[in-house]
Amino acid sequence: MGEKVVNSTKEPLTLDKHLRMSLAPHIRSSESTRKTMLDVIIALTPAMIGSVYYFGLNALILILVSIASCVGFEALAQKFFKKDILIGDLSAVVTGLLLAFNLPANAPWWVAVFGAAFAIIIVKEFFGGIGSNFMNPALAARAALVASWPAIMGNYINPDGIASATPLAIMKSGSTALPSINRMFMGDIGGSLGETSAILLLIGAAYLLIRKVIDWKIPVFYIGTTAIMLLLLGINPDMIVYHVLGGGLILGAFFMATDYSSSPVTPIGKIIFGIGAGILTAVIRVKGGMPEAVSYAILLMNVASPVIERFTKPKVFGRVK
């Protein structure tokens, strides 16, 4: 049926726009990849400003180099594969920001370039581009960087420029010389660029939840399960808040575990994903040799996502067995 019909008097009648016929899908939405990515960038902005405030010029350099490298490598890869150049969707900007947030403040600039190449070319474009990557590109790049340059990726500084272990590494060593909870909440501690300030990350997370860009299930079940498992594994209850505020748990739970491409879309699947990530994080932190564990927990659950979705997909009504 066209947009105009003719009545008995041969006068053209224009159908109301809400009554037009078309092929599926019939749901109309103003949402787009660009709008979603822009919301994520807005949500990450407080933590980005905080990282530059606490760690200075090198933090800004790492952020800019990481973003520029991700955008550049995406354009080059898409051109090489003879695809449309889609850097305008801002997904590479988000990957660049998250990659920078996972780097120590004193890391050299070339580490960001290598990480960007791995995240965009290997993890994203080799698997089909946006929406097809099976794991979070920024976290995969961080894992590759830790495996390649562990000394650089494990060398953290405080905002005052003095080298220092992260709060979780301090606890792992058995020391009790921990920063105050207030310092951890505000971000005045050593760690990766974007993981230190809990308050700034939570402001961004609240924005995403209000805008309905992310669902609450994965982050809430992830953080809650981590806390419960740490208690079951014998961690002092007084230390649980350090585990929640430190080690990139808030950054990972709200901004990377919720990645659309690499996490389940089913409601039950999201709960299972969050619980699984929480169990892995707690077990690795307590029983493993790594104090943080968030990156590897999320990456392992990314790999398990297709299986989770397979067993949690809803039944289709009217389906013939």
Image (tube, grey):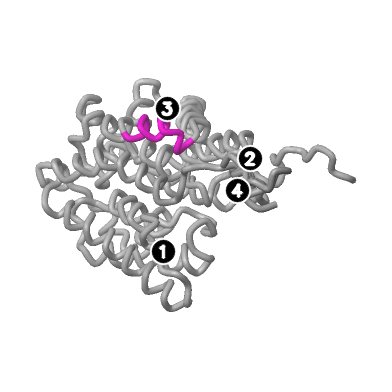
The answer to whether marks 3 and 2 mark residues whose Cβ atoms lie closer than 8 Å is no
Q: Classify mark 2: helix, strand or loop.
A: helix
Q: In x, y percent, where is residue 55?
A: 15, 46
* SS type, badge 1: loop
In this figure, which residue is indicated by the disc labeled 1?
86
- Residue at 28%, 53% (x, y): give it: 100
- Stretch of the chain drawn in magenta: 204-214
Residue at 13% x, 41% y: name it: 53
**Which quarter of the rendering shows the C terminus?**
top right
In the drawing, what numbered circle is on residue 305? 4
Q: Nearer the viewer, mark 1 or mark 2?
A: 2
Left or right of residue 160: residue 2: right
Residue 289 in the magenta stretch? The answer is no
Q: Are marks 4 and 3 in contact (CB under 8 Å)?
A: no
Distance, label 4 to label 3, CA atoms, is 29 Å
Q: Is residue 3 above or below residue 127?
A: above
| Residue that badge 3 annotates | 235
Mark 2, residue position: 19
